[in-house]
Image (cartoon, helix red, strand yellow):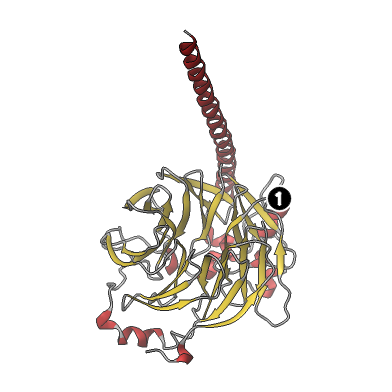
Amino acid sequence: MASATEDPVLERYFKGHKAAIASLDFSPNGKQLATASWDTFLMLWNFKPHARAYRYVGHKDVVTSVQFSPHGNLLASASRDRTVRLWIPDKRGKFSEFKAHTAPVRSVDFSADGQFLATASEDKSIKVWSMYRQRFLYSLYRHTHWVRCAKFSPDGRLIVSCSEDKTIKIWDTTNKQCVNNFSDSVGFANFVDFNPSGTCIASAGSDQTVKVWDVRVNKLLQHYQVHSGGVNCISFHPSGNYLITASSDGTLKILDLLEGRLIYTLQGHTGPVFTVSFSKGGELFASGGADTQVLLWRTNFDELPYKGLNKRNLKRLHFDSPPHLLDIYPRTPHPHEEKVETVETTETSGRTLPDKGEEACGYFLNPSLSPECSPTTTKKKTEDISDLPCESQRSIPLAVTDALEHIMEQLNVLTQTVSILEQRLTLTEDKLKDCLENQQKLFSAVQQKS
């Protein structure tokens, strides 16, 4: 039995939002917390005593999801206003806006190297964006109902998504194909995510269940029925040994995945809990819900080093050692094996983009935002990129880059056009349906008179 000193402790709470908290995320350095709310605002909380919280205004409807980039220099948000925004997490909170979805956007997720962003929407699609080019790349279409969540695997080679069509799909980011499908006859998953090793996925079910699958052998490993309301969100502890769940029954629950059992039930919220997340180091977790409060908890229950804990529990381990799916996928280089510094420098040194978002995009691609850049590098102007390390590393002629950029612009225009056509087609279908219904009513009325 765990002693009292090892139990999770509520450290503090944050009040500032005027409506329910929909999503939250810790900064990579663990010093800030970003929250998204139904009040249309984002807020950035600092853990230092008496530090000011920043409020970011811009979305025109409920903000459904928020996430820090892996380096902490960007904040992505999704909203019911059909847009995705990238913010600079500072006092000014400058942003750039992405528009390609034709319905509310439900989730945002950065790849582990920070190069890509996946967004899930009620237009039944998942879209992937390039952070280096600030461009839409491609869509994944196979779901037949609203997509509620989409997440990258730790190595970036897979995406998992869940939808109200009662399926969870696994996508290969290389060939853009759906490679696996888990279906449920009872409910749908509100939220889904990979475990830290990338071997398993866990889902938060509207049917009050939490399920853990091994994606290598397509096997349901664990099934938990511990809540009395729909499960809205889950978060893996960085060790992969624990899973925390947030539910409409007003509770948070912590599951020990090694022993396959519930170990804690936390009751701090009044009303449904919509979101929960561990900090990147696992020492803290935060939760938010309908009561507009953000609660910050200290973990305490995993103070042993992860290696020692794994040795202690080796005989009870349910999961195989992580092969990173090499047994079912070709042996290609993993993005996470590259040097992070190279990725970050490349990502933040591109030329500013044309059109009306020029100023904002230039700010987003400014090398000074890179945590790895030296002081001498950060003083350079954004345009002066010829002698940055990434320019020699890229080894792509500028003419080819310009041509590709032009093609991407044209594709962007085509995407917008298709989006408009989709909207018009939907309106036409609705009008046709109304006409047919009116015709049927008139026909019935004529028959009755005759």
- Estimate the x, y position of residue 377 in percent, counting from the top left: 67, 70
Q: Is residue 387 left or right of residue 177?
A: right
- Estimate the x, y position of residue 71 in percent, counting from the top left: 57, 69
Seen at 55% across and 47% down, the residue is: 136
Seen at 51% across and 59% down, the residue is: 109
Amino acid at circle 1: Glu
Q: Is residue 329 left or right of residue 344?
A: left
Residue 372 seen in this snapshot: no
Q: Is residue 89 above or below residue 8?
A: above
Callout 1: 10 Å neighbours few (<14), some, many (20+)? few
Question: Mark 1 sits on what residue?
Answer: 358
Farthest residue to the front: give it: 449
283 vs 443, nearest the viewer: 443
Quarter of the image containing the N terminus? bottom left
- Estimate the x, y position of residue 242 in percent, counting from the top left: 40, 76
- Estimate the x, y position of residue 250 in percent, counting from the top left: 51, 68
Hey, which quadrant is residue 376 in on the image? bottom right
Q: Is residue 348 above or below residue 105?
A: below
441 vs 290, nearest the viewer: 441
Query: Judging from the image, what secondary structure is the residue with disc 1 in?
Result: helix
Farthest residue to the top: give it: 450
